[in-house]
Amino acid sequence: MASGVRNGGAGVGPRMSAKLDRQSSSATPKAAAAGKPRLSSAAGAGAYRRTSSGPLPAAGGRASSESGVSSRVRVAVRLRPRNAEELAADADFGDCVELQPELKRLKLRKNNWESETYEFDEVLTEFSSQKRVYEVVAKPVVESVLEGYNGTVMAYGQTGTGKTFTLGRLGDEDTAARGIMVRAMEDILADITFETDYVSVSYLQLYMEMIQDLLDPVNDNIAIVEDPRTGDVSLPGATVVEVRDQKSFVDLLRVGEAHRIAANTKLNTESSRSHAILMVNVRRAVKGRNEMEVSISGENGHSSSMMGSFRPPIVRKSKLVVVDLAGSERIDKSGSEGHTLEEAKSINLSLSALGKCINALAENSPHVPVRDSKLTRLLKDSFGGTARTSLVVTIGPSPRHRGETTSTIMFGQRAMKVENMVKLKEEFDYKSLCRRLDIELDKLIAENERQRKYFDDEVERIRAEAQCRIAEADRECKIALENEKMKYHQEYLDSIKILEEKWKVHQQSPKKQIKEAESTSNDLLQNEKMLRQSAEDEANDLKNQVSHWKKMEATATAEAVKLRKMLDTESSQKGKLEEEIGVLRSQLLQMSLEADETRRSLDRGDGPGKIFPGLDSLVSQTRGSQPREQSNGSKQPIAKLFEQVGLQKILSLLESEEPDVRVHAVKVVANLAAEEANQEKIVEAGGLTSLLMLLRSSEDETIRRVAAGAIANLAMNETNQDLIMAQGGVTLLSMTASDAEDPQTLRMVAGAIANLCGNDKLQTRLRGEGGIKALLGMVRCRHPDVLAQVARGIANFAKCESRAATQGNKVGKSLLIDDGALPWIVKNANNEAAPIRRHIELALCHLAQHEVNARDIIIGGALWELVRISRDCSREDIRQLAYRTLTSSPTLEAEINRLGIKP
């Protein structure tokens, strides 16, 4: 039976939902307390907390403790109530299991008089509510994740026993029916602070040993990347979405469930045909640690206090993995056949590989076959690793499935023997340290400039005041001397006149009068001398005042010299601070270069090489690009950098004379352009023009690659596409495609042109400016990623042409055929890479839909490929499209009849 797409919940039936609701309303606080999980003696409550911060690490920057705490895998068993079919078929038979929840035991009946007893960490009856299941199974794991530990919650059991109901139920109609995924995210969002913390999710499915993205179905073969140093497994190709509220998370789950593969079998009407994996990444800041007070003292005896963090703040990175395993089934009972049979084989093989790994871990075997399946590789950290793991095994009561129930119970018993070493994962946040240093430096520079301006203004004021006083004293002295001179001169003239008059009188008087006149003259002369002496004394006083003002001017000059020395001292301290910041920036730049070299080595596929631990947390501040772990996206600190620094300042760095600054600036712009909310701001601020200028003028391969990637992100918006065309962007991209040899640069350029190919209005202009020729010219690289982008561009172009023909527009022969794209399309129509093959098949179907292209399709050998696609294509929609194309074209149908073949 062909597989379909799930659009509902788990197949557990309305009876189980009703019973769970009744149990939820009747549960008592005492029962909830009894069901709370207990930690083993080796993993007590204090085992989760760090006891010391430890010394600051070197360039690596990891702060997580290497020692771990032993924690056994906790296993709970949940019984599903009988469904309608079992009530009718097994009415005369009792349940094959008997639950003793108060003793945490389960009895499995072999027959009416013989049974076996098994103990579990929790035993949940068919009346247990969803809230009760979450509190005893998942809540301890969620609390550990919030404290910085990795955690895993997994459901295992026969198909149709309620695994998806337990984990993934959304609770749209009844909030009490919400599953573990929804409730876990509610607790996480309620505990974090969005100013300092970050939560993101990825939703995947493992289908037929292929990891597919449920949030982006086009991404259907994600590779697993393993860190050669730590052994950690990551999926860098998966879609990572930041979550800030519960509604958006539920919408993501609803999108993922709509894309999950399901089928109708005899055991379950909506049987999951894939393993669903929800990954929740939590990044939390640890506040109030590693801060110290630093004092900087100057020569004037004053000190200023500066809070500096010479130790970077600590962040905790943890991951919650929720795994909804596909149900194990027996072929004779499920009635699987055809493609559904192949799906069942793949499911049973992966579950068998998981069972072998758990057996090896339970028996302390020296070899654990973790590489036998992608499922076991993804769960490497959950069993025998560093995560806190909780497993819920689901069983049914029907005696007809006693064998499957026994297998499920034994799986849970073996899983209880697996021991994990739980480790706290902390890292130093060098980005915050660098940001604090920059802020403190700006404050010191501003304070220094303010003091310098104040000192300069004070010196100018004192100098001006001294000059004014000296000028006033000189003016007063000159006026006083001139007045005294005029006064004494007038008195002298009056005295001479009086003497002359008296002389005339004495010439006519007797000698006595002459003597009296001489005596009077002597008295007058004596008075004259006394007056002259008094004038000289006043003049000396004025000269003393002038000397005093000159001394005051010398004192003011000495104070100005002293202030100048203070300014020189402050300048020296500023120079030292700038040197220290320069050393830090040079270290950051060196580490950025080493990280880029390491990434280029990994991108070339050289295999595991030297990895610089913890480097990305430093590089991301300098580059403004990605955080340390690729899987966490880059993008959480970029928004803060964008808010604090400002878009105009970031764009101005694109014109810096230093190559490294331009490289890091363009990487920041590229990361900002990846978010749709920032694209309009970047274009309005002139970011698109700056990126095109870099593409035109720069010879640095890294700058050209990142600039092309940023343009590709902006080209996803139709308005930006018109701007790119108007500014000659296609011509620049074509020139870059012809000059570049680096596969990553070509992939970015091909992606940008592919986005432009999807605009109906730009078809003729795009082809006229050489866009199609450039796209076809890049196939010389032969790199799968480049070929995938070329194929996507051709598919978009062909789809736009097909749409124009369907709408009744007058369209001639395809521009793609005119530019010689058809031979390459035919050659790669059966390419081994799924993305390339899928886009080529779509392009070929769209080209063949237009009757004008039919003769070229036949002559170019594309007709045989269309027939093959209509028969053998793995995707039903493309297969049906090829069939409709062949049967709707008279020319193609006539040629098929002539050749005697059937589509």
Image: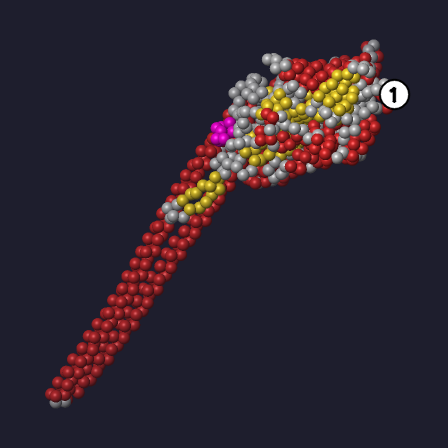
- At horizontal 85% and vertical 18% (from top left) the residue drawn is 93
**Residue 205 location (% of width, % of height):** 71, 23
Please state if 282 lies on the left or on the right of 10 as rendered: left
- Which residue is farthest left? 511
- Where is the N terminus found, in terms of image quarters? top right
Q: Residue 227: say if magenta.
A: no
Q: Residue furthest top?
A: 900
| Side (left or right) of 497 relative to 768 | left
Of 737 and 42, nearer the camera is: 42
Q: Is residue 557 left or right of residue 396?
A: left
* Point 63% across, 30% down: residue: 144
x%, y% of residue 866?
A: 77, 16
Instruction: Residue under label 1, please give it.
Output: 91
| 178, 41: nearer the viewer | 41
Q: Is residue 59 magenta?
A: yes
Residue 534 shows in the view: yes
Camera-side residue of 636 and 353: 353
Picture quadrant of residue 757? top right
Where is residue 561 shown, x and y percent of the image? 34, 50
Q: What's the amino acid at mark 1?
A: Ala
State the residue at coordinates (77%, 35%). 175
Nearer to me, 174 or 800: 174
Q: Quadrant of the C terminus?
A: top right
* Quadrant of the image occupied by residue 7: top right
Q: How is the image coloured?
A: secondary structure
The residue shown at (40%, 54%) is 458
User: As drawn, is 520 to the left or to the right of 263?
Assistant: left
To which quarter of the image does residue 157 belong?
top right
